[in-house]
Amino acid sequence: MNVVSMLAKRRDGGPEALPDFSGCKDAAALRQAIEKLCAPFGLVSELDIRVYCRNGRQIRGPGLSRKWSVCLLRLQTPDATGAFGAAYGLDRSSTEVLIAPELPDDFVA
């Protein structure tokens, strides 16, 4: 059974807060940043990155990004994926992890 757990940037900067991905200007840089984040737990075996844009002025405001991504990843082993997820406060039984980082407005998909 696949268990997918989600990581999103915590606003309070708690211990399981994701790093800031605002320095990633394209998908290759985002992939590299995610692989670096996962490196202490093993190699990434699967990584699917989808980029989305928000439109409309109702979502604009201080601290709100207009672009974000959904990144589904799996490390080489379920144990490695579980350990990665557990380090960020997720259930250790996760076999896939979904990361949803905000991106800079000048991100190029």
Image (tube, rainbow, N blue to C red):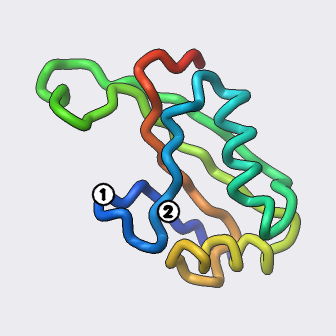
Q: Is residue 100 above or below residue 6?
A: above
- Which quarter of the rendering shows the C terminus? top right
SS of the residue at dot 2?
strand
Residue type at the position of mark 2: Met
Residue at 52% x, 20% y: name it. Answer: 107
- Spot the residue most to the bottom: 92
Between marks 2 and 1 in the image, the one whose residue lies nearer the viewer? 1
Residue at 69% x, 30% y: name it. Answer: 29
Residue at 19% x, 19% y: name it. Answer: 56
Q: Closer to the camera, 74 or 42?
A: 42
Picture coordinates of residue 82 (x, y %)?
A: 69, 77
Q: In which quarter of the image is residue 81?
A: bottom right
- Which quarter of the rendering shows the N terminus? bottom right
Residue at 33% x, 31% y: name it. Answer: 65
Residue type at the position of mark 1: Arg
Checking the image for residue 6, the label placed there is 2
How would you rate the neighbour count of disc 2 (Cα within 10 Å): few for under 14, some for 14-19, many for 20 or more? some
Picture coordinates of residue 88 (x, y %)?
A: 54, 72
Q: Closer to the camera, 95 or 35?
A: 35
Q: Name the residue tied to disc 1.
A: 11
